[in-house]
Image: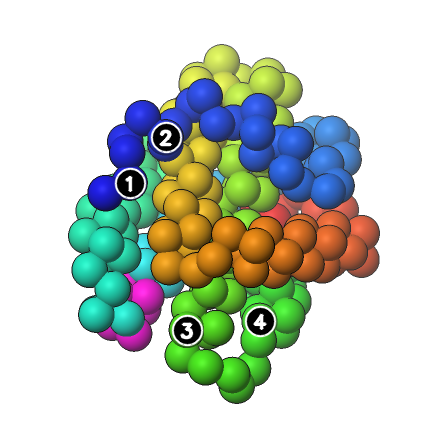
Amino acid sequence: MIKSEEKGEKNVPFIMLGLKLPTDPRWVNLAEISLEDILTDHAYCEQKAAVSCISLIQGFPDKKELVRELSPIVTEEWGHFRMVLAEIERRQFNLGTQRKDLYVNQLLAFQQKGGSREDRLLDKLLFCGLIEARSCERFRLLHEYLTDPYLKEFYYKFMVSEAGHYVLFLDLARLYFPQDKVKTRWESYLKEEAAIMQRLELSGNRLH
């Protein structure tokens, strides 16, 4: 069983050290100008996170620990979507259309094609963990640098939650695979993610 105390706020500094490239702090200024777009994008990101967990459960129902741990995350992520949607409505914004996610699509392209079912599981867990790590880092920036006091606290809660999800996905990877294999593949993902971050234009209308 993955210990609950391994998840949560205390892991946030570790996550920041894990990522190879920090977000340009100017991103927060751009995001604050485009709050409606950021909240819309955030809402869809929470939807996709829930769907990813459902997909893992459907694809690997024989992994009992995975099913047990991810089942409540589905509910949590959908609850996050509702929280963001409520904030959009509170501000009298509109939920816009879903954009093409260049960041996620490039990470998906890095996933191993073919190979064994087990290798595909490892890549899916690390892919999800990395997205949670970057989301946590961005939520931390929003918490620290937004001028709106309400949104600062709003994003603090998401930061802590994403930290826990990051830890969970990596713990699941370490549960099912040898430590050295997880470490090697994780390092490859971190390097690729940093390269993707460098290639993408800094934009305030998207979370990643």
In the image, the segment drawn in magenta is: 54-59
Relative to 185, does residue 84 appear above or below in the rendering? above
Give x and y (percent) for residue 30.
Answer: 70, 36
Give x and y (percent) for residue 49.
Answer: 38, 55
Find disc 2 in the rendering and name its residue.
6
Q: Earlier in the sequence, mark 3 or mark 2?
A: 2
Find disc 1 in the rendering and name its residue.
2
Tell me the number on the disc at residue 203: none
Farthest residue toward the top?
149
Tag 3: residue type? Glu
Q: What residue is drawn where x is 45% and y is 21%?
A: 10
Q: Nearer the viewer, residue 181 or 28?
A: 181
Q: What residue is drawn where x is 58% and y is 43%?
A: 134
Q: Nearer the viewer, residue 126 or 181?
A: 181
Find disc 3 in the rendering and name its residue.
118
Tag 1: residue type? Ile
Q: Are marks 2 and 1 in contact (CB under 8 Å)?
A: yes
Q: How is the image coloured?
A: rainbow
User: For the residue labelled by badge 2, is the local secondary structure a helix, a strand or a loop?
Assistant: helix
Q: What residue is drawn where x is 36% and y is 32%?
A: 7
- The alpha-carbon separation of the residues under discs 1 and 4 comes to 25 Å
Write down the quadrant of residue 199 in the picture. Answer: bottom right
Give x and y (percent) for residue 149.
Answer: 49, 13
Q: Earlier in the sequence, mark 2 or mark 4?
A: 2
Relative to 46, does residue 139 appear above or below in the rendering? above
Find disc 4 in the rendering and name its residue.
111
